[in-house]
Image: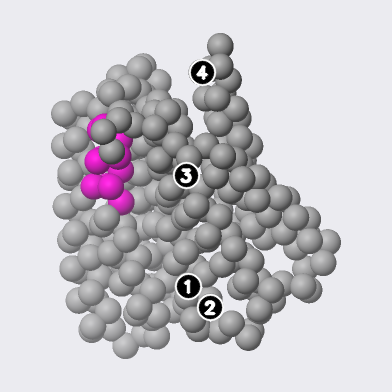
Amino acid sequence: MPEQARTSRGFGRVLVAVYAIFALSATARSGVQLATGFSDAPLAYLLSGLAAVVYVVATIALARGAERTAVAAIGVEAAGVLGVGLLSVMQGALFADATVWSDFGRGYGYVPLVLPAVGLWWLRRVTHRSAT
Amino acid sequence: MTHEVAYTLAIAALLPAAGAAWLAVRGHQVTDALFYAVSVIEVALLVQLVGGCIALARTDRDVDGVTFVSYLVTVVLVPPAAFLWGVAEKSRWGTGVLVVGMLTVSVLCVRILDIWTSGHA
């Protein structure tokens, strides 16, 4: 790329790094889960797969400056962590195994809960700054 | 023995993380000293990769070998990736990328120990 996208400059540089780590770990986790025992916990493993796709899309979109795609991916991420977090706390029996988003991301130091809020804040800031 | 290696690496990786955090707060770009500190960690991680593979071949415990080696390889890739991504940003945030990278290395080293001791991911 000749020049950096505005979403991956400045603080965005750190944000993309954090998203990349989650993309990598969610992909690895769901790859292993889907390959070794899909029938053990189909709902949890499908959600792990969805989480992996969302993190990969968000990482690439932020890195390349695809702002609308980034907003959509991070929106799905926010809905996912809140929805799955709530369901896993209220109806734990639905999930035979943990996902990245279970218990609001407790297994990952609650970073999955904070990350979409930070991501949306950053995208809003980037787009607003250019408008003025 | 393995515990000492894993914890030493996990704590050692926190040193450049703390140094990078200090530089980032003060608004500095990535410095030469930080580059050398990260390089030292990288060499230690390469030694861990080789040592871990030898230990895996010799052990009679029930370790999930594929997961163990994939973590050993992943952790080696993190510092160069963080450095390349971070150095392109000529501001404190480039240094911030190294903070994230080194914290990740630290967490991964503890996870590697978990995999070694429990036998599962």
Q: Nearer the viewer, residue B86 or A105?
A: B86
Callout 2, which amino acid?
Answer: Leu
Residue B13 position in % (x across, y down): 31, 45
Query: Pointer 1: residues within 10 angstroms few (<14), some, or many (20+)?
Result: some
Residue A31 is marked as 1
- Kind of residue sitting beneath label 1: Gly
Q: Which residue lies at the image location 52% right of the left edge and 37% below the top edge?
A: A67
The magenta-colored residue range is B78-88
Q: Pinpoint the chain carrying mark 4.
A: A
Q: Give the mark toward the camera: 4 or 2.
A: 4
Q: Amino acid at mark 3?
A: Ala
Q: Residue A123, position in %: x, y? A: 56, 31
Q: Residue B45 — which label?
A: none
Q: Confirm whether residue B77 shows in the render.
A: yes
Query: Dominant secondary structure of the magenta stretch?
Result: helix
Label 3 secondary element? helix
Between A77 and B32, the residue placed more toward the observer is A77
Secondary structure under tag 1 reads helix
**Image quadrant of residue A88?**
bottom right
The answer to whether marks 1 and 2 mark residues whose Cβ atoms lie closer than 8 Å is yes
